[in-house]
Amino acid sequence: MAQDLLGSGARPLRVAVIGSGPSAFYAVEALFKVEGLTCRCDMFERLPTPFGLVRGGVAPDHQKIKGVARIYDQIAQDPRYRFFGNVEIGRDLSVDDLRAAYDCRIWAIGNEGDRRLGIPGEDLVGVHSATAFVGWYNGHPDHQRHRFDLDRVRRVAVIGNGNVAMDVARILLQEPSRLESTDISDEALAALRRSEVEEVVLIGRRGPAQAAFSPKELKEIADLDGVAVDVDAAEVELDPASAAWLEEAAPRSAQRNVALLHELASADPASGRKLRTVFRASPRSVLGEDGRVVGLELERNQLEADAAGVPRPHGTGQTERVDCDLVLAAIGYRGVPLPGLPFCERRGIVPNDAGRVLESPDGAVLPGDYVVGWAKRGPTGLIGNNSPDSKDTVAALVDDLGQRTAASLSDDDASAVPALLATRGVDFVDYADWQAYDGWEVAQGVHRGKVRHKLTDAGAILAVMRQLRGSA
Ligand code: NAP
């Protein structure tokens, strides 16, 4: 059979991108910008709707951030791009199916699981991951089974103090009328309207200098009408290790966090719903009565610098109790293994060397498989950080292409995957289906005075897509 240069006009490179969040779209964009490369990109998404955490993670009161989807929408207009929604790899197509149908695969599967607290009482009713709460209020189909009876909750303990913790705290504390015009789910808005929450306790295992939230996020809560940030002056005093670290090695955001916390500690106490910050405390057990959470046992920590000079928490043995009716663990995400794709159990990511997938964490490179985003580097960084990260992986992919040649493609190559899906009875949707549904959500939102009205059930979304397809 004739052989042509892979990625040339005579033999286009066929790339599968798995996942449709920011890192996936930035990878497609980077590929389309490679000069002299002829390629086609098929994107696979388990849900009928694209955009990953931009749709299902970014808080509804951060619509500006969600607006980044307009860039992805432009990328999707390229004729070299196809979207296959409602296709789950591992169920509808196997990793081997993708190996057979594409020259390269870019895994942009994110971190769909959460880290576990690993403490007694973690499974009591009223203990949830922040991921579940975020997915629930954002209308993510995976998370609608959860129940958050906020009418029986007065105090919420949020474990961890990253930006996810700040998102959930802000959603719980603000006046629900502020959320009415957003794309928050109807159920979440109704629960927030009934909410009896008076206080959110934000629990960081290290000190104020190591708080993981961005200063902007703290300021946003402090500026909310009817919300008071309660910072105890003793809590935000720095230990010597942190003071040295803040001066010598800490990022500027840490300095701004500490300055802001001190400002809040010296401010007059405001009235309203409260965000209370607790530092240097780790949860040791969740306390329950009749199977339901009633409190948290915390152990106070002291910080000691590790070999690299980074302050780390060490338990002092001193414990205290925080009464609460709901616990949200916002301690970070974690990847979920996919059958047929290597997984690093320790880090919860796809093992890789600068984006090239490895057979195992110390193993050889798996030719043709690449990884981007949180599945590559773990759950860190803002949406924009994924753009350079995806570009790096695509550069590695292009480097590896070198002078590789491949057999010519048959005329019906492009229809092979749709045909395979059809044979398997997979009801996949394309980008035009998404666009039609997107317009429907927005139009439904207009009737209700909101930016969009999301359906929260994948079956219901598919039914609307089918109906719109029929009437097009
Ligand atoms: P994160 O920033 O890594 O914060 C995780 C928090 O959990 C940290 O305070 C961490 O403490 C703590 N933690 C981890 N394990 C713990 C344990 N076993 N016990 C107690 N505490 C524990 O993660 P995230 O909040 O999930 O956010 C993920 C990424 O998304 C971040 O880069 C974040 O900035 C980004 N994000 C941004 C926004 C926004 O811009 N609005 C919104 C949401 C998310 P240590 O620091 O001591 O490890």
Image (spheres, rainbow, N blue to C red):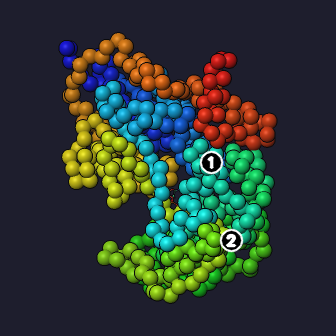
Amino acid type, callout 1:
Gln
Mark 1 Cβ and ligand 1 under 8 Å apart: no
**Position of 292 relative to 184 (above/below):** below
Residue 461, position in %: x, y?
Answer: 63, 33
Q: Which residue is mark 2?
A: 155
Expressed as whole percent of the image width and height from the top left, the position of residue 417 reads: 40, 23
Residue furthest out toward the top: 411
* Residue 173 vertical position relative to residue 20 in the rendered view, above or below: below
- Asked if labels 2 and 1 touch by Cβ distance under 8 angstroms, the answer is no
Residue marked by disc 1: 144
The answer to whether residue 65 shows anywhere in this view is no
Asked which secondary structure carries label 1, the reply is: loop
Quadrant assignment, res 96: top left
Specify whether residue 455 is in view.
yes
Viewed as shown, does residue 291 lie left or right of 109? right
Question: Which residue is depicted at the point 75% across and 62% down?
Answer: 151
Above-or-below relation of 449 to 235: above
For mark 1, does the 10 Å Cα neighbourhood hold few (<14), some (14 to 19), or many (20 or more) residues? some
Q: Residue at x 76, y 49 (%)?
A: 180
> Residue 258 location in percent, x, y?
55, 74
The foreground one among 425 and 243 is: 425
